[in-house]
Amino acid sequence: MKNKNILIQTSKKTSVKKYSAIVFLLVLSLASCKKYLDIVPDNVATLDNAFSLRNEAEKYLFTCYSFMPSNGNPLANMGYMTGDEIWTSLDEREFISAGWRIARGNQNAASPLFNSWSEGDRQLWKNYWQAIRNCNIFLENVSDETKIPDLQLDERKRWIAEVKFLKAYYNFLLMRMYGPIPIVDKNLPISASEDEVKVKRMPFDDCVNYVVGLLDEATPDLPQRIRDKTLELGRITQPIALAMKAKVLLTAASPLFNGNSDYVGFKDKDGVALFNTAYDANKWKKAADAAKAAIDASEAAGFKLYTFPGTTALKISDSTKRQLTIKGAVTERFGLNSETVWGNPNSTTGFLQAVAMPRLDGANPVPVGQARQQLAPPIKIAEMFYSKNGVPINEDKTLDFTNRYSLRKAVKAERFYIKEGYTTARLNFDREPRFYADLAFDGSTFFKYDSPGNTDEGTYTVEAKSNQISGANNFGWYNETGYFVKKVVDWNMAHSENNVTYRTYAWPELRLADLYLMYAEALNESLGVPSQEVYEYINRIRSRAGLQSVEVSWSNYSTSPTKYTTKDGMRQIIQQERMIEMAFEGSRYWDIKRWKRAAELFNQSITGWSIYQPTSEEYYRVRTIFNQNFISPRDYLWPIQTYDLTVNRNLVQNPGW
């Protein structure tokens, strides 16, 4: 996207003031409405100048985009480190994560972490009320056809639609964090009375209807696909808007927000209930219909599940090609990736790859500090992936994982996953392809573009015991659990003795597999019994991952062979399938909360291998790293900062805070 790095500056003609009306309106400490873009030659920025000509208005359009979350940065992605999916070292060497501090129980109401209600950090997290205010200013001015005379009507409609989408998206991000929020459809003038600006939180269902309404208004005037990929890649299209509508409605249909008795009595100052605590099955039907519409639009626009196209320059096995297909669904560059419905070119992944990447042995080891290996999934995440038979390891009746922490030596047939002759844990054998594509571990192979001999025979190996190259022997730059996030590192990463090159990619905000999973989940819930269509969309993802269908896998290999035939059983399958397929993309944290399973899953111990030990016998002992403490229902919603409640007495705090 061009003009993406737009700075907001204060007019030199107008002094900066704090207007109480704005403070109360947005329930945060915003500067006055005299904050605009530096867009005119004499450095005097006014609203008249901002919307006088097309080029200047386009800069304001991109300012509305600039508040999109930087999800390609693990320190900025609110769902990445905040739950139980990834752990790291207490040393926090050049890796200070607010999300991880929330995961360790340090959220608070006095000074909330990731406070997107009344504070923002333009690098790590954004102030979404400020984003909504900018969107309102844009819509008010661009909707006035007497302004911007050189803006063509079709482009005007498209821009308005894009900003309506962004406004809906920023509202949804607030709702996902805080639940019920105020609806600020128009900016109030500075002359507004004190009573007018003391806005109230609206019932959650009203917020959902408002956001869906904006998305419905926006969709017809958006393009089906981006045709000028050089200048416009990342801008909003019809499939993106329809997919976001599906995500909003799926969230609203989920147990956290649909029939949650924990919120009985949660009311505003006038006694208005902020949640409808009666379960509404029709919400799942709406979510299913929206997801199917998004799938149809995405497939009509040419999106399909990604498959690694192959290469004539390298000699690689089918096992490695499968891994590159699974990884490539995330890491292939936006515009070339057939699966990425919406990528964010403003948030690329160089830092993410560096903190995920293990140091590798070879003629030229990866330099210290260039592969920081700090992202560490706990053992329970490794256990979450299926067996090679496509069922949970505690259900597989043909493979015994009761001794999964014992030791075993890899044989030649396993060499594309684990180095031949290497001793590692039983847990790491006989697993599905996504396990080996997503995770690296002591003894695992790590194929990439510069592998010796241009082949996956004898490729790089992760050696993670304390006296080995990937081990815990460098202050702060080591892996805390013994599992590494391989999925997010593009296979084109190359290194020499003195240099490392990461090929960055735009963060995939929405991909087609996500839509398939949303549709299967909503359809299973709305029908009340699994249908062939539910199976079909799950099986599309499983087939791409190298697994047999749900029906075949459970019938032949599971100790619960009829599990997939019931709504409750299929729900468990869909949820595990989603957690596997979307692993390490910042999805798990929000999914577990909307499923209302956080009190179950976020109160389990974080465990890892004994990484400070040098021998296999000592290293492969499970150790407890941390005992999480998720407090329900308090921790399901973010706290509003205590100060903001004193500024606007019409606001009420979320339960438990």
Image (cartoon, rainbow, N blue to C red):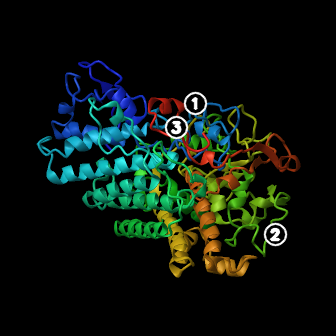
Residue 603 coordinates in the image, percent (x, y): 72, 50
Q: At label 3, which amino acid type do we have?
A: Ile
Distance from disc 2 to disc 1, alpha carbons, whole Å, reads 50 Å
Residue 495 coordinates in the image, percent (x, y): 58, 42
Residue sitting nearer the eye, 587 or 262: 262
Residue 46 coordinates in the image, percent (x, y): 21, 28
Q: Are marks 2 and 1 in contact (CB under 8 Å)?
A: no
| Relative to 83, residue 431 above or below | below
* Residue identified by numbered label 1: 110
Q: At label 1, which amino acid type do we have?
A: Ala
Q: At label 2, which amino acid type do we have?
A: Asp
| Relative to 484, residue 238 above or below | below
Q: Earlier in the sequence, mark 3 or mark 1?
A: 1
Residue sitting nearer the eye, 25 or 169: 25
| Residue at (66% x, 33% y) in the render | 92
* Residue identified by numbered label 2: 400
Q: Is residue 17 left or right of residue 93?
A: left
* Residue identified by numbered label 3: 640
Q: Which mark's residue is nearer the viewer, 3 or 2? A: 3
Q: Secondary structure at mark 3?
A: loop
Quarter of the rendering occupied by the C terminus: top right
Q: Is residue 68 left or right of residue 520?
A: left
